[in-house]
Image (cartoon, helix red, strand yellow):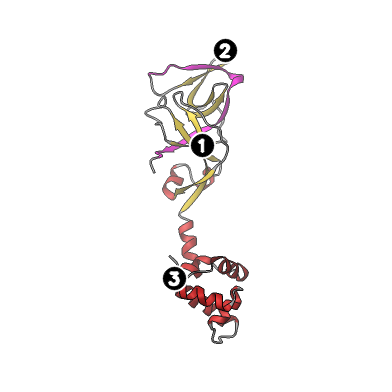
Amino acid sequence: MPDFKEIVSRIKDILSDELGNKKVFDGDIADALGIKRFSFATMKSRKRIPYKEILEFCAKRKISINWLMFDQVVQSIADQSEKFERIHYFRDIYASAGGGALSHDEQSEFLSLDKEMVNHLGGKQAIKNMHALNVIGDSMEPTLNDGDIVFMDKESTNPSKNGVYIVTTPAGLFIKRLQLKSDGTVALVSDNKIYTDEIVNSEDIRVLGKVIGAMSNNF
């Protein structure tokens, strides 16, 4: 929780510097924030922080709000941010690995990945071409489990190469291995051997990308 007294002290330092190291009073702070002086006095007695006015104060002077509110050094914030990379995560899209219901809400959010996971997926450059979505079903066990988050390289759409792919078919969205047949059909192959191959016509299938990695969604 931000400390009102410390915030006021930092604002005084900023204004003092602007005024040529002159002493700054609460009235000066109220004026700088665009708040009536008696209103600011009430806020101070109640320790109620004027967030909107402080945000505008910082934006006008290009000051880090993190520094003013929490005394966080800008470089330390940058260092923390650099520990993670972000990837588009379609939380509401499920690719079936066994016949579950599918959702096709195209709204995405960002999923933060630590350096170890980024390296596992091929590095910063590689993840620029990736999207994340969910697995539903058990037909790809033990390779992929129900509820896993999978990372799809949307630039890898050549089904002739070995691997697990995410594909669209008239029946929905699937995660499968692909086998191209000489008669123009494609076999959707499950790793879980209790499932038989599904055969579809090549013109009815579109490869969205190759699965590069996965992680459990238990967080």
| Residue placed under numbered mark 1 in the picture | 92
Residue 205 position (above or below residue 124): above
Tag on residue 194? none
| Residue placed under numbered mark 2 in the picture | 183
Three-letter residue code for mark 2: Asp
Q: Quadrant of residue 51?
A: bottom right
**Residue at the extreme top:** 183
Quadrant of the snapshot with the C terminus: top left
- Give the mark count: 3
Magenta stretch contains residue 206: yes
| Residue placed under numbered mark 3 in the picture | 3
Q: Quadrant of residue 185?
A: top right
- The image shows residue 197 at horizontal and vertical percentages of 46, 17
Q: Residues within 10 Å of mark 2 (few under 14, many from 20)?
A: few
Residue 47 position (above or below residue 149): below
Instruction: Work out whether mark 1 precedes mark 2 in sequence or the reverse, and give the earlier one.
Output: 1
Q: Residues within 10 Å of mark 3 (few under 14, many from 20)?
A: few
The magenta stretch is: 194-217
Mark 1 against mark 2, which lies toward the viewer?
1
Which residue is at a point 59% across and 70% down the rendered structure image? 57
Mark 3 against mark 1, which lies toward the viewer?
3
- The image shows residue 198 at horizontal and vertical percentages of 49, 17
Which sits in the foreground, 152 or 109? 109
Instruction: Work out whether mark 3 precedes mark 1 in sequence or the reverse, and give the earlier one.
Output: 3
Q: Secondary structure at mark 1?
A: strand
